[in-house]
Every structure is written in structure tokens, then in C-alpha cells.
Image (tube, rainbow, N blue to C red):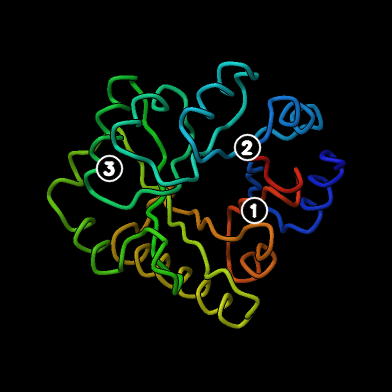
């Protein structure tokens, strides 16, 4: 795999303002350094133990995104350095992130994860649950988290029209929340959707952050 070339090719297909998260899960530090030396500094991991190990070994100007399902009891390990948490799917988790961010004197950017796919295995809020969260008294007391947008994963299928419909649904959710809860809030601007197989559709439907792994690093190592 020509990692540097792969990153360059993907970036050339992206409109200005769309951020590429190079998903480095299961990949060794050496591969990440190849990408880093090519000028890319945004990486995503989905396992806390792996992420912490890589953080300790790699340059400190890397912007780390946690893209997996984060367990509350593991937030403390990533709170000192994480830039973005993509998968916030409960008030309980948001409160833990706020507590740990406060201990580290930081504000952590969080994306609300929505369940847009037809698969029951995916995590995420329904629109009603998001309304309940954002209308609650508690949300205003969370001074160390910044809700920066939304995130979702489409159904794993070859049916492009279904994928497009699901991404369009997430964009509509973003627009609704922006109008009703974040009007004039500059930091609420991200729509994280699209992976190696479907990122071009996602970008077409308004994605601002894509999460690409195998198209950069090759198939996963287990």
C-alpha cells in the first residue's frame, strides 16, 4: 500500500472544508508515521487501549478522533488528549466526558451519534432522544463538552439509494438541531458520515468529516 499516495488521492476528491480522518485502527505505529510524514495529522481509533498506546508513541501534534463505541469507564484514559469523540449516544456518557474533561481542564468536542441504519447492531440516538437530551436542564451544566455536530453510519449494503437516503436523513437531523438548538452556535457544524466504501456519497449529501481506513492503509490487521 502506498499510504501517502492514497491519502493524497482521497484528499483530491474532497471539497474544501471536508476533513479526512485516517482510521488507523489495527494498524501499527509505523504505518501512521508514514501518513504523518506525508503531512496528514488527523487519525481515528476505536479501541481505548490501542489509542492510548499510539498516543504515547507518536508525535503530540496529531489530532486524535475516537470513532468507536466508548464505554463510560474508559473515558478517563482518553480525556487528557482526545480532540473529538464521534460516538456520544447517551446523557450518561456525555456527563462522564464532561467530568473527565473538567479534571483535565479541557473542553472536548463531541458528536451525537444517530441510529440511521436499518441494522440493529448500530448504536445511536433517535431524534426524540436527542430532543430530550438537548431540552434537559442538565445539558446546560456541562461546561467541559462542546456538542460540535452529528455522526452516523449507513447500512452496510450495495444499495446506493438506501445509503444516500440514510445520509440525507442525518443531514436533515443536523439541520433541525441547528435551527432549534444551535442557531448561531458556530461550533455546531460537523456532520461525520462516510467511510471507505461510501464516503463519496456522504460528501455529496453534506458530510464534513469522513472516516477512511482500508482505502488508506489496506485491509485491517487482526
| Quadrant where the image shows the N terminus | top right
Q: Are marks 3 and 1 in contact (CB under 8 Å)?
A: no
Q: Earlier in the sequence, mark 2 or mark 3?
A: 2
| Quadrant where the image shows the C terminus | top right
Closer to viewer: mark 3 or mark 1: 3
Residue 118: horizontal and vertical position, in percent?
Answer: 44, 74
Question: Is 24 left, or right, of 1 in this rendering?
Answer: left
Reply above or below: 116 against 219. below
Q: Which residue is mark 2?
A: 26
Residue 134: horizontal and vertical position, in percent?
Answer: 23, 56
Question: Is 90 left, or right, of 119 in this rendering?
Answer: left
Question: Is 153 left, or right, of 106 in this rendering?
Answer: right
Q: Of helix, strand and loop, which one carries label 2?
A: loop
Closer to viewer: mark 2 or mark 1: 2
Residue 162: horizontal and vertical position, in percent?
Answer: 56, 80
Q: Which mark is residue 93?
A: 3
Residue 95: image quadrant is top left
Q: Nearer the viewer, residue 82 or 147?
A: 82
Q: Earlier in the sequence, mark 3 or mark 1?
A: 1
Q: Residue at x 76, y 33 (%)?
A: 35
Q: Residue at x 44, y 41 (%)?
A: 85
Q: Nearer the viewer, residue 91 or 182?
A: 91
Dot 2: few (<14), some (14–19), or many (≥20) neighbours within 10 Å?
A: some
How many labels were placed on the picture?
3
Q: Residue at x 28, y 42 (%)?
A: 94
Q: Which residue is mark 1?
A: 18
Q: Of helix, strand and loop, which one carries label 3?
A: helix
Residue 112: horizontal and vertical position, in percent?
Answer: 37, 54
Q: CA distance from mark 2 to mark 1?
A: 24 Å
Amino acid at each position: 500500500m502506498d499510504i501517502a499516495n492514497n491519502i493524497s488521492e482521497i484528499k483530491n476528491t474532497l471539497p474544501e472544508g471536508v476533513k479526512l480522518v485516517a482510521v488507523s485502527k489495527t494498524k501499527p505505529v509505523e504505518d501512521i508515521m508514514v501518513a504523518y510524514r506525508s503531512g496528514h495529522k488527523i487519525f481515528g481509533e476505536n479501541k481505548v487501549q490501542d489509542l492510548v498506546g499510539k498516543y504515547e508513541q507518536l508525535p503530540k501534534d496529531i489530532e486524535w478522533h475516537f470513532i468507536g463505541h466508548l464505554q463510560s469507564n474508559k473515558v478517563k484514559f482518553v480525556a487528557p488528549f482526545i480532540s473529538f469523540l464521534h460516538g456520544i449516544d447517551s446523557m450518561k456518557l456525555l456527563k462522564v466526558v464532561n467530568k473527565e474533561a473538567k479534571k483535565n481542564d479541557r473542553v472536548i468536542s463531541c458528536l451525537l451519534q444517530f441510529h440511521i441504519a436499518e441494522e440493529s447492531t448500530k448504536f445511536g440516538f433517535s431524534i426524540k432522544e436527542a430532543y430530550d437530551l438537548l431540552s434537559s436542564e442538565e445539558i446546560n451544566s456541562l461546561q467541559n463538552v462542546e456538542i460540535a455536530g452529528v455522526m452516523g453510519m449507513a447500512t452496510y449494503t450495495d444499495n446506493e439509494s438506501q445509503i444516500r437516503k440514510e445520509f440525507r436523513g442525518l443531514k436533515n437531523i443536523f439541520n433541525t438541531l441547528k435551527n432549534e438548538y444551535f442557531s448561531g452556535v458556530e461550533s455546531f457544524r460537523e456532520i461525520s458520515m462516510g467511510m471507505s466504501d461510501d464516503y463519496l456519497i456522504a460528501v455529496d449529501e453534506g458530510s464534513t468529516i469522513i472516516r477512511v481506513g482500508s482505502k488508506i492503509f489496506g485491509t485491517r490487521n487482526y
